[in-house]
Amino acid sequence: MYFTNRTVRWAARSTLSAALVLTLFAPANAAAAAPAAPRIDLSVLVVGDGGPATAAIAAELDGAGTPYTIVDLTRQDRPTIDSGFLSDTLDGRPRAKYQAVVLPNDNPFGAGSAEMEALVSYEKTFAVPQVNAYTYARPEVGLDYPANGGYSGSLDGVRAEVTAAGAAGPFGYLDGGIPFEDNSPSVSESYGYVAKPLPGADFTSYVEAPLPGTPERGSIVGEYRHDGRRELVVGFVYNQYQQQFRLLARGIVDWMTQGVRLGASRNYFAVHVDDVFAADDRWDTELNCTPGDVDCAPGQGGEPDPIRMTAADAQYAAEWSAAKGFTLDMAYNGGGSELYKEEHGGTDPLAQRLTADKNAYRWINHTYNHPFLGCVQDVTVVPWICAKNPDGSTKYVTRAEISSQISENRAWGQRAGLPLENNELVTGEHSGLKVLPQQPTTTPTSAPPSPKTPSPGSDPTTPATAPSGRPARPSPCPATP
């Protein structure tokens, strides 16, 4: 069996359109002057064997929206990889159906395989590159055996480096080393081969790791050119979630597609600081819950022990942000500041410091008092459940309360001079959408009710606070399930 992701048809249409344009505007005698150039569809062939490495590359392609076809070698009903599977002729032009090939290793079919011969011929004919997702270091891939001055074994905690050739080529986006995960001393998390290029081989090392006990380094990712073919040789095993693969994934795909592909790879990094101005409650390590919050039974642990940033913390945050050139996103609750002032003589040094540095941050409305804006929570039991109306239906926070939380917090931010985008919102406790298992549907009162069908729980007398009568101190993000 094989699977083609949905964007393959998009690739075919795109390349077909390009072919039509070239045909329509080509000179009348072009066909007679020279044979038509081959057409190469923007799609990748991934041949998997059930291992994590090819699955990781497929996941990277999927995330970027790059078309690919998977052939699962473990399936009896899979198609045979032959010349007809790989190429054909379309409108008189030779067509390569795939711009790159990903294999579990350099030859997963075995010696003398007709399928491997078909792939080799295809790659030579159309100059299609091949990625060996995880392969043993040996002369067949341009490397010397690890026993000859190399290394094989655990790479946990190793720090690899991009070579000058890698930085000038597919891995130029990386700045710094590539740390291999070492999350547990009792578990081997990554195994690999660190090897030296075979003397005389046309091999370019892109990523290298240190050889234990020596000042030398060996290749763990490199390009092997031979017999009119190009192979990217990856010498360590990985899965799609490991840090070392996440750092190298973009370069692997860029290498195989030569930077010409459908889809896009984007990486974003931001620090989203929730509940700014609000206090949090302290976790009780003996009770294994937070007194005053929904994960402790009412009264368990006594009174809440609030934690809140200080003005000194805020000053350090502004200094750190300026020094690092990194802007923090502040999701704020103005009601937290007002509650603090009520309890501390009418002043709030933290709010004064943060608002004085307001232009150092980005600000996001996070609702005034940070309530849960889904169903009304019944926290008399742990875990909490949704309160019910007399007819047994789920009781929801009213639309009026939701609107009030948004507008009051926006007004507070405007009075404080915060630079706001009024169409941005992070709801309190990240609520409003379904929360499993308690609330299986999105909050119906979070949108205007239908003129024909009243929204459940839209009774304006519905309380906005949990029925336990607990204080309205903002609770931590996100909601505890």
Image (spheres, rainbow, N blue to C red):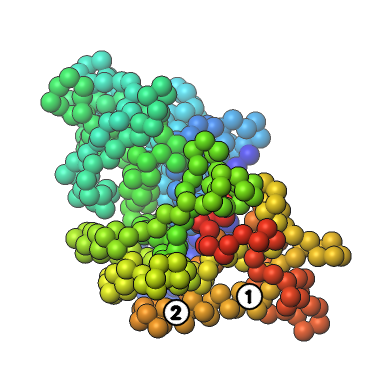
Q: Amino acid at mark 1?
A: Glu
Secondary structure of the residue carrying tag 1 is helix
Total marks in image: 2
Residue found 40% across the figure and 83% down from its top: 415
Q: Which residue is mark 2?
A: 412
The location of residue 355, given as percent across then percent down, is 32, 74
Given residues 80 and 345, the one toward you in this image is 345
The answer for how far apart the CA atoms under marks 1 and 2 are is 16 Å
Q: Amino acid at mark 2?
A: Trp
The image quadrant of residue 243 is top left
Which residue is situated farthest in the top direction here? 147
The image quadrant of residue 332 is bottom left
Residue found 67% across the figure and 46% down from its top: 382
Which residue is situated farthest in the right direction here? 391
Tell me if 76 is positioned left or right of 252 in this view. right
Q: Which mark is residue 303?
A: none
Vertical order, 378 against 389 (above or below):
above
Given residues 360 and 379, the one toward you in this image is 379
Secondary structure of the residue carrying tag 2 is helix
The location of residue 478, given as percent across then percent down, is 53, 55
The location of residue 89, given as percent across then percent down, is 51, 54
Which residue is situated farthest in the front direction here? 345
Quadrant (top left/top right/bottom left/bottom right) for the N terminus? top right
First in sequence: mark 1 vs mark 2? 1
Q: Which residue is mark 1?
A: 401
